[in-house]
Image (cartoon, helix red, strand yellow):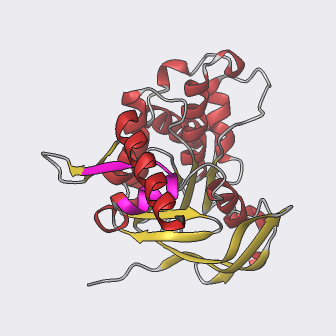
Amino acid sequence: MVTEPVAVSATGLNLSLGDKVILDDFSIDLRSGELTALLGPNGAGKSTLLKVLCGERSVSGEICYFGRNRQNWPPHQLAQHLGILPQHSSLTFAFTAEEVVALGALPLNISQARTRKIASEKMAQVDVTALSSRLYPTLSGGEKQRVHFARVLTQLSQAGEQCVLMLDEPTSALDLAHQHNTLRVARDMARAGAAVIVVIHDLNLAAQYADRLVIMNNGKIQADGSPQHALSESLIETVYGWPVCISHHPVDGYPVVLPAGENANRKKAENRAAITINQTS
């Protein structure tokens, strides 16, 4: 079995905000050719970890890209190999959608004609071609999200074998079809050799598209493995505080997580309360 090279290596990361520990001696390796989904409840540190890995937030510990310490990467060179899609963008200029996508080519040494060609291809890939001439501030949240995804794909179009794509909740504002298309594009990037890291809340989308699930809570990794191995009913209830049932997709076989109904959750809470009373009496 051929092991893909490590694209991003983080060792001994520590970060606290006030009294809350966000990352607790946290270490992880992310490999090329693999789509990794970061999962966990609100406040688990998923988005913060992404900011740390891309250098937006400083912490103690060491981070390397392709075996080279992050501090030794010139910013313009790193921008050709590392692309980040944040949850939100503060862009308010009256650029057209096409002009926003073309901004992705700024770190690249390519002609305007080449930029337009690549931008056009990436816009078609994420289904925003029809928005080309629309002013960015007039777009819906989901449309803006997809336009920025096309921008990031344009930025990474010259990355070659050293490519890292980080997506922070890329499906949060999208409808059903565009959720799946976005993750399909991300998975295709991984199949082409990129290391893809996606912060996502939907366990079922993660199970369907990710090669690896990393479930975080309290600053540590609670589970790390394939969807079949990382997802269990007991772990999900422990981490998320809600009971679930896990079955498997009837065609593709990936795990399907079904949250328990309100009655089932109330019954479990009553059982736990009864056990506590019996133990203390």
Instruction: Answer yes or no: is residue 261 visible.
Output: no
Please state the horizontal and vertical placement of residue 260, each as a whole percent of the image. Answer: 35, 41
- Confirm whether the magenta stretch covers residue 245: yes
Name the foreground residue: 149 vs 253.
Answer: 253
The picture places residue 197, in percent across and down from the top left corner, at: 52, 59
Among the 4 quarters of the image, the one containing residue 142:
top right
Q: Which percent across, then down, holds residue 154? A: 56, 46
Q: Is residue 260 above or below residue 157?
A: above
Q: Is residue 73 above or below residue 80?
A: below
Q: Quadrant of the N terminus?
A: bottom left
Question: Which sits in the foreground, 123 or 191?
Answer: 191
Foreground of the two, 138 or 27: 27
Q: Residue 235 in the image: x percent, y percent?
A: 42, 63
Task: Please report the residue visible at 57 percent of the width from the left and 51 percent of the height from the top.
Answer: 41
Q: Which residues are magenta?
A: 234-246
Q: Is residue 179 magenta?
A: no
Name the residue at the right extreme.
18
